[in-house]
Amino acid sequence: MAKKSISVKKRMRQSEKRRQINRIRKASIKKAIKGLMLTKTKKTAQPLYLKAQKLIDKSTQKGIIHKNKAAKLKSRLALHVAKLK
């Protein structure tokens, strides 16, 4: 195995740390979406929708998910909330 330079080792540490953070953020988005989709009333869904929308927007700004995927997710969530009574 070849020797690795100091900068390569640092880059490996950084990328692993970022990977873990990104996984946590993606999981929180999925959890928020799932919680919203399981709601039955509009009254309980509205605050959950705002929370999920905020998480999606922040992850888009940080480059975790693509802006088109964020738009698609928010659109689907908005449709779901609109259909509720």
Image (tube, rainbow, N blue to C red):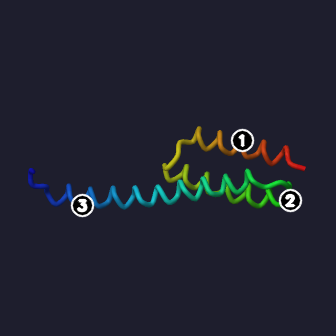
> Which residue in the protein does label 1 denote?
76
Residue depicted at 61% across the width and 52% down the height:
56
Amino acid type, callout 1: Arg
Residue holding disc 3: 10
In space, the residues marked 3 and 1 are separated at their CA atoms by: 40 Å
Q: Which residue is mark 2?
A: 43
What element does badge 3 sit on?
Answer: helix
Q: Tell me whether circle 1 and circle 2 mark residues in contact (CB < 8 Å).
A: no
- State which mark lies toward you, 3 or 2: 2
Question: Residue 29: x, y in percent?
Answer: 60, 55
Q: Position of residue 23 (x, y in %)?
A: 47, 56
Q: Distance between the Cα atoms at labels 3 and 2?
A: 48 Å
Residue closer to the observer: 84 or 11 = 84
Report the front residue among 2 and 74. 2
The kind of residue tagged 3 is: Lys
Q: Tag 2, which secondary structure?
A: helix
Mark 1 or mark 2, earlier in chain: 2
Mark 1 and mark 3 in contact (Cβ < 8 Å)? no
Tell me whether circle 3 and circle 2 mark residues in contact (CB < 8 Å).
no
Between the residue at mark 1 and the residue at mark 2, the CA separation in whole angstroms equals 18 Å
Give percent across and percent down for residue 69. 59, 40
Q: Residue, x 77% and y 61% (percent of image)?
A: 47
The amino acid sitting under disc 2 is Lys
Q: Residue 32 vs residue 11: left or right?
A: right
Which of marks 2 and 3 precedes in the sequence? Answer: 3
- In the rendered structure, the answer to whether residue 30 lies left or right of residue 4 reads right
Q: In the image, is 22 to the left or to the right of 44?
A: left
Task: Residue at 32% x, 59% y: name it.
Answer: 14
